[in-house]
Image (cartoon, rainbow, N blue to C red):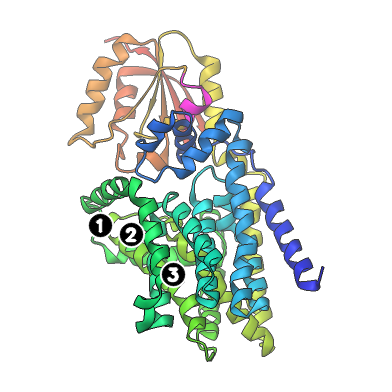
Amino acid sequence: MNRSKTLLVCIIGVAALLRLYQLGTKSLGVDESFSVLLAERSLAQIWRGDLHPPLYHVMLHFVAMIGRSEWLVRLPSALAGIATVPLSYQFLDRLGFPRAGMWAAVLVAVSPLHIHHSQEARMYSFLVLFCTGSLYCLLRMLQTRSTRSAVGHVVFTVLGLYTHNLAWSIVVAGWAVVAVTEGRPLLRWRGFLAAQAAILFCYLPWATGLFHHATSIASSSAGGDWGRACAAGFVAITDFLSGFSYYLQDSSLHTLCLLTVCLSFIVFLRAMTWRQPNRLFHAATLLPFAIPFAMSMALSWKTGMSHSKYFFPAFVPLMWILGLGLERMQRRRSAALPVYLGMVLILTAASYWKYYGPDQAGRDPWRNISAYIERHWQQGDIAVFNGPYSFYPFAYYTHGSLHWEGMPKTIPPSMQTVAADFGRTEIQRVHRVFLVISPGSQMGIDPRNHVLQWLKENARCDTTKHFGAITLYSFGVRKPS
């Protein structure tokens, strides 16, 4: 084994350690619980049970047949995250830049954002893997025109499209790469056209699902704010480059984050101003980042969604560009290289401390909340949640055996009316109410806590307990008039 392969194996080993360490420690969150509960249904129900394509939940369906522990349901995502690391290297190695490929593999392996989603029972780790594999096989197609590469491109692309609708951004990026590098003879390249036809044919069974998802986005009234979309893009870039902002939001490292983003922009320019005689160099590195990122910005503008995971198809292509910039700086022995790497190291270590540190158990307290309610549950009790989806972890940990209700999915004109209706229909016929207030699910549902206030005025608050950011109230019988 030569030196490069040995180094790559070590990087993969570090990636595996970071993704498997404490894999089952945290309790499942809202989205994870939804995925597991959906995966436990029949395959027919999975097919029509979510706006997202069904591949991930079908795979999780068979995993759940073995067991439903946190470690087991997250293991496929961890394995997908580990497999992304060597693919990140192979792409740039195929392009003729093995040292840059090694830098990109390191950046992917230690990325706190990628580790987070590799330890989550959701589809985003698979989305990154399949998009990376699709681009790698497309590059091989452009270089060799081989049937094997075309088949690999079709397989990875179809898997990505059946994992998440965001994979379409990589398809569009692939078309742009081919158009730029091949020029007018593109229409005469039957192999590429046949591959795209095969992809579209395989996707036909889910075409109606894509239509329904697109219709729901088109009918969204939350968008139209480019300022918010730009802010979402900036946060995504920050998460890609300088740790995971979720774990640094309460730290004193914001200035260092900003400086790291600025230095990363310089590294980015170093890569893009590297003169190469082959048009494939710039097309294969810039377009797979720019097009998915721009499409995610447009989606954020339309829907108001601001999570960094919605920019994830652009993650590995950005690491490729940074890897090329770092190689160029290394060749020129730039004094900025150790400074940049030191800043990234500090921010990554700070994210690791927040993620793996002693206070991480309090971030996802659903296991403890469910256990507490189960211990104190009596006949005639009810658990109520202030959001339409926050009951999923409770249903997962209690196996759906206890009586719960969520607030309405459709926001009514007056939450006071809901509070009064809830009081008339629930308080009078139950023994006790466990009210779970989750800040994440509270947004847009009952921001002023009308239900909580109504219960405090019309029932006796016996217990108030805090589980991280989530608060649990226990209310007894009505107060005497």
Q: Residue furthest right?
A: 1
Residue at 50 percent across and 69 percent down: it is: 138
Q: Work out which quarter of the rendered image holds the N terminus and state it.
A: bottom right
Q: Is residue 260 visible?
A: no
Q: Amino acid at mark 2?
A: Ser
Q: Tell me residue 367's x, y (percent).
A: 56, 30
Image quarter in which the C terminus is found: top left
Q: Which mark is residue 223?
A: 1
As drawn, is 300 to the left or to the right of 192? left
Q: Is residue 413 above or below residue 268?
A: above
Most foreground residue, 199 or 25: 199
Instruction: State the separation of the CA atoms marked 2 and 1.
Output: 7 Å
| Residue ID for mark 2 | 300
Residue segment shown in magenta: 393-400
134 on left or right of 51: right
SS majority, magenta: helix
Residue type, numbered disc 3: Gly
Residue 394 covered by magenta stretch: yes
138 or 433, nearer to the observer:
138
Q: Circle 3 sits in a helix, a strand or a loop, which is it?
A: helix
Look at the picture and state if 4 lies above or below 115.
Answer: below
Picture quadrant where residue 83 is located = bottom right
